[in-house]
Image: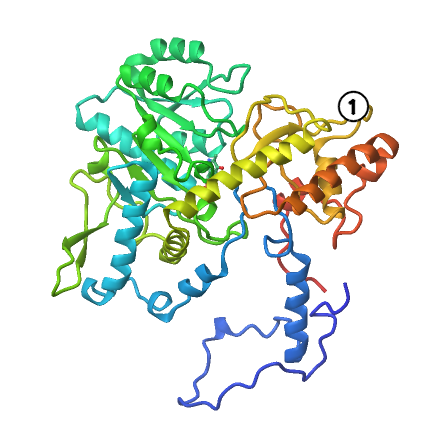
Amino acid sequence: MESLIFEISRPGRCAVKLPDLDVPPAELPENLVRDELVLPEVSEADVVRHYTRLSQMNYSVDTGFYPLGSCTMKYNPKVNEEVARLPGFASLHPYQDEESVQGALFLMYYLQEFLKEIGGFAGVSLQPAAGAHGELTGVLMMRAYHLDRGDAARDVILVPDSAHGTNPASTSMSGLRVVEVPSDARGSVDLGALEATCDEHGDRLVGMMLTNPNTLGLFEEHVEEIAALVHARGGLMYGDGANMNALLGIARPGDLGFDVLHYNLHKTFGTPHGGGGPGSGPVGAAFSLVDFLPGPVVTMDEEWSEESLPHFAFVSPRKSIGRVKAFYGHFGVMVRAYAYIRMLGADGLRRAAEHAVLNANYLMSQVKDLYRVPYERVCMHEFVCEGVVPGAPDVRALDISKRLIDYGFHPPTNYFPLIVHEALMIEPTETESKETLDAFADALRKIAEEARIDPDLLHQAPHSAPVRRLDEVRAARELILRWEG
Ligand SMILES: *Cc1c(COP(=O)(O)O)cnc(C)c1O
């Protein structure tokens, strides 16, 4: 890498011209003066080139295909970004009074309404900061529901063995116990085992967390029976809605028996994610739980009329579990989701889901003869195969993923869900063309050949990336964030 910013530093070079002082000069407090700090002295062109070059080393949805399963790394229309940056939205301050932010409340109110309609729920709160935070919120609401009925002994949440790691984690954080439910040979919840578990924990059951489509990319075949079993023991159904990209406009979790569910606006509704930026995990609730939603939520306290615009206000639901987030949630993400939903409309959202499912099934049909698909059914928006090549016993899913980088592709999700051996979880999303999907399948085909002929080529991959194979565990444990000359 040429032009590392510290190495090209030359005394006296400068990228900024500070304005003339317009206040009386004052001495800085001693503890703020750090003479020993080594700062690069470089020109503006040096700085711009340095950061532009760094940005080009990153892989992104804007530069290539990003089939990271369970994440819905879809192309996010640029108009969302433009709208979120409008000064009237971007410059709002959370301490402004309600009268001066009626436009923002309008947007939040209608986003709540759209999400209610999309999920089939009676109410929505936009507060939670991300999916995992929505889970914690939902579990706390379920617990509050039971406590409100004087049912204090319930402390068990059922979680399938295919679940995303956040499901057991958020359950534990809420102080409840996780009881795992196995999957059956078709990749669905094992109904017999569920019934036995329900019998064992019946009067201790807070409820069940279920992801649909599940993390194998499969629609739960017995979702209504599952909900009936749990409801019959007085339990509630929590829906992990991270996979809503497959359901938009086709099936509504509220109609399928879920009592509470989180949406991931940064997966399904057009906000970029993956770089650690803000997400948003609104929670939808059925009538039985709507009073427990975190507040404040937005209500329309004066309707539209011929003479006047509607008026909006923040209110706290009657038995609210309280706030789960400072102020009102991640407003910028809400703006993007609102823009995305309005742009696509009801028909467009349904088409997005249909194309997401079509693309995943097409790609699966191209890949399944190369890499075994252990639960081979019509999939939803993603599918899981085994990163195993017959005739190349030393090659693992990780090697295949690293080699994909050399072919210009972001790897799929590796080693999740845990119930699939050497899992490669592939989610193409709706916006990719047949040409892209064919090119990706082609790369996987070539890699399978390479694995048999020259497995070391895969073990050493990537060969063409700015950095070679990293020790990912060490990289996470021993972060070096400071330049040392
Ligand atoms: C992404 C995801 C989550 C967690 O969502 P975050 O927004 O990343 O916290 C939960 N469950 C599933 C199935 C997911 O894919």
Q: Amino acid at mark 1?
A: Pro
Q: Is residue 135 above or below residue 304?
A: above
Question: Which residue is drawn at the image coordinates 81% and 41% (left, top)?
Answer: 460
Please indicate whether residue 233 sits to the left or right of residue 187 in the image. Answer: left
Residue farthest to the front?
Answer: 347
Disc 1 crowd, CA 10 A, few/some/many (<14, 14-19, 20+): few
State whether residue 432 is above or below residue 89.
above
Q: Position of residue 479 (x, y in %)?
A: 62, 50
Question: Which residue is located at x 43 percent, y 13 percent?
Answer: 191
Provide the residue designation for mark 1.
390
Q: Position of residue 423 (x, y in %)?
A: 63, 29
Residue 166 versus residue 103 in the image, above or below: above
* Residue depicted at x 47% and y 26%: 219
SS at circle 1: loop
Viewed as shown, does residue 338 lie left or right of 232? right
Q: Residue 45: percent from the left, percent from the top?
A: 66, 78
* Image-quadrant location for residue 7: bottom right
Determine if residue 137 is in view: no
Nearer-the-camera pick, 61 or 32: 61
Location of residue 426 with respect to 483 vertically, above or below: above
Residue toward you, 182 or 247: 247
Q: Residue at x 39, y 58 (%)?
A: 332
Using residue 374 as the reference point, say whether residue 137 is left or right of it: left
Q: Quadrant of the C terminus?
A: bottom right
- Residue 259 visible (yes or no): yes
